Image (tube, helix red, strand yellow):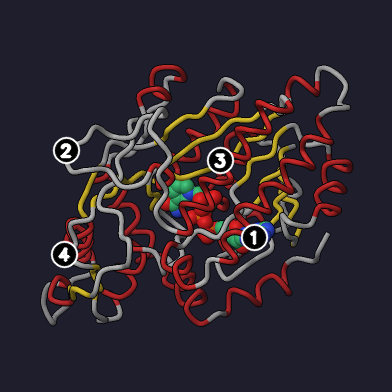
């Protein structure tokens, strides 16, 4: 059994589904269900005893102690975070609380659980911290992609809080010997992505005939990875990664934001043509985000070389699947937009 934090969020939910499908192993899913937590994404697991959902906060030390003592998971995979850069600009406190204090609380609980474990449980235990490429800061246009040796230069409250959590994880390994692994991944996209983030926002707005807001000149470059490829990378690192190491995860898919938006418009034109004309007519440039990083790009060669990991999707195949998923799951989107997804918890899960 493993303990996943934030398993009702975008990547966490994809990971829980992927983990159970590929390993058959049970998961305790600890999530406090902020606006970003959506248990409907895990509706296919309702009634499946391999998914034990616990509504709770990663800052709640007593709860984490109880879960570790009761279930003795052999790994903690830590996704729970405040994750939206725009929100971090307007309300940074929650980011420091969850991303820094929450990670600290988990690390302390993990350490005190791990130290007295008997062998071989003790050697097998892992704390896997899921982090972002945004900790490395902004990359000049012609610079080589971020390697694991790149300086930490976070620029937003979000990336600064994630950088702080990465440092805590590193320190708990160096100081206490806690068997940690850290992965720093590029931007994810795919099913169950909350429609405040670029790709789902553009799909959902286009289908509603609303403007497609593009920050500044739209030339901010991001490196994109299909979420299921991120999940497979975490599984590989958890199974075979070297304790104490950091692995960058990315798909070698650098794209300017405006190209992403144009690609989505072209796919929608093909899959759901609008009699009013191409969806690209809805593109609207808006004032840039303060401190907006110009470019992120990941060098994932260490993971490819040492663990033979490779993404299964190219950007072209992944974005096509994603647009298709949003077209086929209009109900999921509608229930996120109306807030109805929150009621699902009350009727389908009781706190355990
Ligand atoms: P998300 O915002 O979709 O999900 C976060 C989840 O954490 C939600 O279910 C939320 O309810 C839960 N949560 C928040 N605060 C909590 C708390 N105090 N206690 C328990 N649960 C809490 O985020 P995501 O996009 O799925 O990202 C997951 C992780 O991956 C984050 O750590 C993020 O930094 C990292 N990451 C994300 C991306 C990306 O492109 N989305 C890329 C690289 C790394």
Residue 126: x and y, percent? Answer: 68, 30
Pinpoint residue 99: horizontal percent, then vertical percent. 60, 54
Residue of label 3: 166
In the picture of the structure, the residue carrying the numbered disc 4 is 217
- Spatial CA distance of label 2 from label 1 is 36 Å
Return the residue at label 2. 142
Q: Pointer 2: residues within 10 angstroms few (<14), some, or many (20+)? A: few
- Residue drawn at x 45%, y 43% is 228
Q: Residue at x 31, y 47 (%)?
A: 138
Q: Secondary structure at mark 3?
A: helix
Q: Earlier in the sequence, mark 4 or mark 3?
A: 3
Left or right: residue 217 compared with residue 348: left
Q: Considering only vertical position in the picture, is 246 above or below 196?
A: above
- Please give left or right for residue 316 compared with residue 10 in the image: left
Q: Earlier in the sequence, mark 2 or mark 1?
A: 1
- Determine whether 202 is above or below 65 in the image: below
Residue labelled with disc 1: 97
């Amino acid at each position: 059994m493993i303990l996943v934090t934030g398993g009702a969020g975008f990547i966490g939910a994809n990971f829980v589904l992927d983990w159970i499908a590929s390993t058959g192993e049970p998961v305790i899913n600890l999530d406090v269900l902020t606006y970003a937590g959506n248990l409907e994404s895990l509706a296919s697991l309702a009634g499946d005893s391999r998914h034990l959902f616990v509504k709770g906060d990663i800052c709640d030390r007593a709860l984490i102690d109880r879960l570790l003592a009761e279930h003795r998971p052999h790994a903690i995979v830590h996704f729970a975070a405040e994750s939206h850069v725009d929100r971090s600009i307007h309300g940074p406190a929650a980011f420091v609380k969850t991303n820094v204090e929450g990670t600290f609380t988990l690390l302390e609980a993990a350490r005190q659980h791990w130290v007295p474990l008997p062998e071989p449980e003790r050697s097998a235990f892992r704390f896997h911290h899921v982090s972002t490429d945004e900790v490395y800061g902004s990359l000049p246009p012609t610079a080589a992609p971020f390697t694991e040796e790149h300086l930490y230069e976070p620029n937003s409250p979000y990336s600064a809080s994630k950088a702080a959590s990465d440092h805590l994880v590193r320190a708990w390994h160096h100081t206490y010997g806690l068997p940690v692994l850290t992965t720093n991944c590029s931007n994810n996209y795919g099913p169950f992505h909350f429609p405040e983030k670029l790709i789902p926002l553009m799909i959902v707005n286009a289908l509603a005939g609303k403007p497609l807001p593009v920050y500044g000149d739209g030339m901010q470059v991001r490196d994109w990875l299909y979420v299921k490829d991120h999940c497979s990378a975490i599984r590989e690192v958890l199974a075979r990664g070297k304790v104490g190491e950091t692995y960058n995860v990315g798909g070698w898919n650098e794209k300017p934001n405006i190209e992403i938006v144009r690609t989505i418009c072209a796919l929608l034109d093909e899959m759901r043509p609008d009699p009013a004309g191409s969806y690209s007519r809805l593109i609207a440039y808006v004032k840039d985000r303060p401190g907006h990083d110009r470019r992120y790009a990941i060098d994932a060669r260490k993971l490819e070389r040492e663990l033979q990991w490779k993404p299964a999707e190219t950007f072209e195949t992944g974005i096509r699947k994603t647009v298709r998923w949003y077209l086929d799951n209009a109900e999921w989107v509608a229930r996120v937009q109306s807030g109805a997804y929150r009621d699902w918890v009350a009727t389908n899960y009781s706190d355990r």
